[in-house]
Image (cartoon, rainbow, N blue to C red):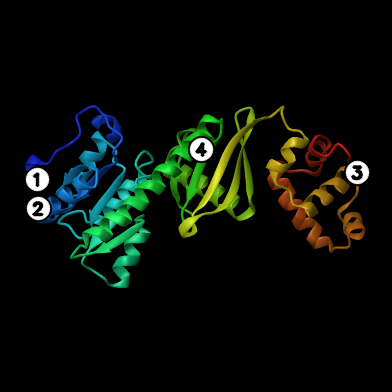
Amino acid sequence: MTPSSETPTAPTGTTSASASTGVAQPVILVVDDSLDTLRMLGDALVAEGYVVMAARDAQEAIERFEVAIPDGVLLDAVMPGMDGFDLCERIKATPAWSHVPVVFMTGLSESEQILRGFASGGVDYVVKPLRIPEVMARLATHVRNARVARLAQEAVDVAGMGTVLLDSLGRVAWRSPQAMVWLEQAFGTDAAARERAAQWLSKARRESMAGVGLGQGRLHARNLGQGGLGESMLVLNLAPADNINAQHLRDIALTPRETEVLSWLAKGKTNRDIADILGMSHRTVNKHLEHVFEKLGVETRTAAAAMAGKLLPQA
């Protein structure tokens, strides 16, 4: 591989690195301002069966991404101009690129630099001088995991749902195309709208389920649980407004206690009556009803009782 002005790039007009090569080998983008490092890694990656792209700085790396999205990135942390941490944040902030695993290469072994790499969205780091076998082993693991996760997440879209991956700080690490469409329809596309969407998704992670009105239906986000590195996967589905029935009780994710409270509310009991029947305080009943109203997407007892008639036929 010959970097700099002779650095190979994918053909113009492609949107997938794999498509540009016509083969199934994973494509790795190496970003480093050192020609020697680029040559060394390029030779090692080619020997391992990878297709290699190279960039000398952050701007070149962005240009490579705009032509062909790689399967993984080996990224120098310290470079002139935009450093590797800022470039990684740029990659992770772009939905079409955010799934690509970024492995930092750094000669800085201080904890602060390592933590900054993870905070910017990196999945791993290797310390210079590089030990090539270690680099290849770590990279192979992350590329394989990312491919499997992406296939699984895209399959959810095919099934008529969407997927969102939140990192340990509650930020959107990845969202499938269908999820992106629904979130933009429900909340908008500006910065304030993205913040509202993030708060809604965080609520779904905390409470297992959240809902919001969307057109003639209701968008639900359900937390599937925590994955690696504190990440959480949420599945989104859009339920038509006229399709609310007992089957959706599981989707709304009422707790057993909330279901009991809703059942007695639907029978016309006051909060004080419900407290006496269930042996809890009046304040606890109020708190349960707050959660029930929020999960059902209603604001009044009357609306909740009407909804309970569909959700709880026995009520």
> Residue 129: x, y in percent?
18, 65
**Which-is-in-front pick, marks 1 and 3?**
1
Q: Earlier in the sequence, mark 4 or mark 2?
A: 2
Q: Where is the N terminus found, in terms of image quarters?
A: top left
Q: Earlier in the sequence, mark 4 or mark 3?
A: 4
> Which label was assigned to residue 183?
4
Instruction: Say which quarter of the image contains residue 124.
Output: bottom left
Amino acid beneath label 3? Lys
In depth, the one of 64 and 201 nearer the eye is 64
Q: Is residue 73 left or right of residue 210?
A: left
Amino acid beneath label 4? Leu
Which secondary structure lies at badge 4? helix
Residue that carries the numbered disc 2 in the rendered image: 35
| Disc 4/disc 3 C-alpha distance (Å) | 36 Å
Residue that carries the numbered disc 3 in the rendered image: 267
**Which-is-in-front pick, marks 1 and 4?**
1
Crowding near the residue tagged with mark 2, few <14, some 14–19, many ≥20 C-alpha atoms within 10 Å: some
